[in-house]
Amino acid sequence: MDNRYSCFFSDMGFLNVAISFIIGISTLIMIRIFYVVYRSSKPLYSRPPGTLSTLIILGSGGHTAEMINLLAVMQMDRFKPRYYIAAATDNMSLQKARVLEDSLPDKAEVELVGTSQFMQIYRSREVGQSYVTSVGTTLIALSHALWLMIKIRPQVILCNGPGTCVPLCVIAFVFKVLGIRWSSIFYVESIARVRRLSLSGLLLYKLRMADQLFVQWPQLKSKYPRANYVGLFQVANFRLYWTSEETEVANHRIFQIKYD
Amino acid sequence: MGESHDSVKSKRIVFVTVGTTCFDSLVRAVDTQEVREALFKKGYTDLVIQMGRGSYIPTKSTGEDGSLSVDYFTFSSSIAEYLKSASLVISHAGSGSIFETLRLKKPLIVVVNEDLMDNHQSELAEELAERNHLFCARPQTLYQTISGMDLGSLVAYQPGDATPVANFINRFLGLNDE
């Protein structure tokens, strides 16, 4: 046999192996992604043992108020520990979450075991920031989000926009694909969205990253059939504004949050 | 207590709020002579304007000459108190202001800011206006809305309930064993 020929043949063999390896891996990943998407749309088969670690992503202003309203009617004793994340520029949201946590019946336990934690996350782009510098800040924000998600590894994610929740949900989805952690992602679209989903809602819907997406208007349900319409659930104690007394109490609390 | 209640009663306050936005065309619209007169004709005595980041300064008036008294400020930590004391609220289309006002069962005129690029907020105001929970206007139609409005036609907003969502999530997670 010609030596040169056999060398060429073994080179070819290596290339072939490498190509089929890459094709094989990507096929496996694709199959895995399809499986994760399919599995995510179905309820969990069996009740997971114990309580569920839950990540609650607070948007800002009205978004936070809506999320707090939802949390107020949830059986919070089954969702622990609870991690609250808000943008670093948004102090009010964590204050409101803290007020809610303080009002829960198992308050003593919260203080003892630390069932709830409050965190802030860097935003990828502040309003008015230039696009050139936003590349750098986006990278920082992404690695910060990844770091937080590695630490938390939640089983349940509750979010309702705006943008802050998207990188966290993408990371959670990657964790599901890689088998690091299975999480159920719930996205609740704001009551302010009547005819079109918000950008973050649309992204999570189109990319099928949210296990379940809730909308509050029937128009949205007919436009996005995979969404769940459960009626207008903006509740009675919607509180965007506080009385001056409440603001004072909250301002006092912010020090506790910042230096926890 | 009874006395202060009486003095609040004899005052009928219109509270204008733009939230944290800049909405000069609304402030300019409520500051026009025709809108002021229309409000006074409807029996309102005081106009309080929260003008946010806007740069248009409305003209103050003590109202001693038998007209509408006008006052303004930029921001306040006690918006909730202003809303409570108002007999009519004229607001920007932010969902927070809208639902806070509806929760207090105050008559509400929402003015849509047409200068905003992403104007999804007008959807909410128009939808709620269709259900007669509020009146929806543009800065240039505010006068017509005020002079033509019939507060009796408003339907109180019945607050919704988030429990179905919580139950759905529980069922999805297999937590419904009760």
Image (cartoon, rainbow, N blue to C red):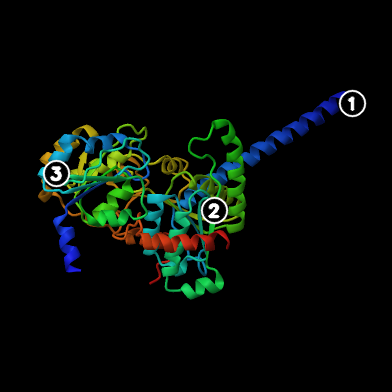
Query: Disc 3 designates what residue?
Result: B65
Quarter of the picture containing the C terminus of chain B is bottom left
Of the two numbered discs 3 and 1 in the rendering, the one whose residue sits closer to the viewer: 3
Q: Which mark is residue A120?
A: 2
Query: Residue A87's spot in the image, x, y percent?
Result: 51, 49
Q: Which chain carries label 3?
A: B
CA gap, disc 3 and disc 1: 111 Å
Q: Are there few (<14), some (14-19), or many (20+) residues within 10 Å of tag 3?
A: few
Above or below — where is A250 with respect to A14? below
Whether residue A171 appears in this view of the structure is: yes
Query: Disc 1 designates what residue?
Result: A3
Of the two numbered discs 1 and 2 in the rendering, the one whose residue sits closer to the viewer: 2
Q: Mark 1 lies on which chain?
A: A
Q: Residue at x 18, y 59 (%)?
A: B8
Secondary structure at numbered mark 3: loop
Three-letter code, disc 3: Asp
Three-letter code, disc 2: Gln
For residue A223, what is the image quadrant?
A: top left
Label 2 near label 1: C-beta < 8 Å? no
Q: Which mark is residue A43?
A: none
CA gap, disc 1 and disc 2: 64 Å
Is residue B6 shown left or right of residue A25?
left
Question: Of A195 and B85, which appears nearest the observer?
Answer: B85
Secondary structure at numbered mark 2: strand
